[in-house]
Amino acid sequence: MALSSAPGKVYLFGEHAVVYGEPAVPCAIEQRARVGVERRDDEKIRVEAEDLSLDGFTVEYGGRTEDEPDIDVSESLLAAATGYVDEAISQVRSVTGEEDVGFDVTIESDIPLGAGLGSSAAVAVAAIDAGTRELGTTLEAEEIADRAFRTEYEVQDGQASRADTFCSATGGAVRVEGDDCRTIDAPDLPIVIGFDGGAGDTGKLVSAVRDLRAEYEFASNTVDSIGNIVRNGEQALENGDVEELGRLMNFNHGLLSALGVSSRSLDAMVWAARDADAYGAKLTGSGGGGCIVALDPTEATETALKFTPGCEDAFRAELADEGVCRLE
């Protein structure tokens, strides 16, 4: 069996706008998904999910996506267990030329599912790395990122960007603008994450922003403004100016709220962090529920979040300098 891990991520700036060619800056964090892949003697895929924020489960089904398992779990969890795994395995088969191989796949994750911390990207990256190595092929991080992007692109009906998968594959802070993906320098950041226990529907939220842009010119201008925030944020990162990063994060959250992708619980956590004198705070990911990211070197924000109604968990996150890791 081959075993790989890949990190989750937070967005400092740029989610949603990155879909329209604007830059984005996500950072990998040391919350990881671990995927083990072992070859089978038939074409079936068996998925054992130890922890995807909900109770663990095991499913076994034919090795093609149309053979969907009949199990009683939430749609988002089923997508994580079958959709992303199926597409990742499809990439493994494509790159190795072994089209009829089956796999036993085990997934363990520290990353809340659908909460804006890049769980699907981490699973896809780790699954592709482990799957190809199980068949005797070792890919470079950049190709893993590309194959994982294709996985998300298919599952998300063409609405994915390269940001999450590139960040998960390479680690560190990255800058993504269209197909241009590269790592960038970043100081040690005092990252605090608040989690409301929920999850947003990425596809619906991205579609809603697309419809808003089509209907209102000011919504399109709002997306452009997020791109300008990212460019200013890059300069703040280069200067190591964490206070300026926080101010820009506050602006970014306001614009995302204007686009309708925040929620009452996310706003409550953002304001709790700001009231605790965090440098800045914003939602991270597609929104609608899930997580916020704040910058605060003290314990005040984490403490405040733990007493905020609607916040299920609050924790500090370290930057992950390393992306995909080969464990076995």
Image (tube, rainbow, N blue to C red):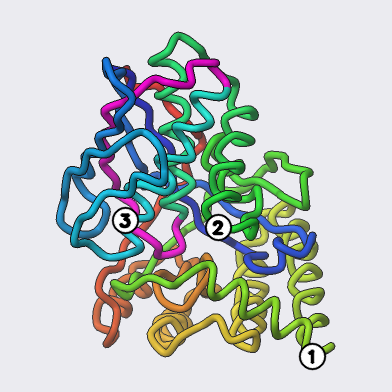
Q: Is residue 324 above or below residue 179?
A: above
- Helix, strand or loop for disc 1: loop
Q: CA distance from mark 3 to mark 2?
A: 14 Å
Residue annotated with mark 3? 78
Q: Nearer the viewer, residue 263 or 187?
A: 263
Q: CA distance from mark 1 to mark 2?
A: 24 Å
- Tell me which amino acid carries mark 1: Tyr
Q: Nearer the viewer, residue 150 or 190?
A: 150
- Tell me which amino acid carries mark 2: Gln
Tell me where the magenta segment starts and ends, as one range.
Answer: 95-117
Q: CA distance from mark 3 to mark 1?
A: 35 Å
Viewer-nearest of discs 1 and 2 = 2
Q: Residue at x 16, y 48 (%)?
A: 57
Where in the figure is residue 123, as x and y percent of width and height? 41, 42
Where in the figure is residue 309, as x and y percent of width and height? 27, 87
Placement of the N terminus among the 4 image quadrants = top left
How many neighbours does mark 1 have within 10 angstroms: few (below 14), some (14-19), or many (20 or more)?
few
Q: Earlier in the sequence, mark 3 or mark 1?
A: 3
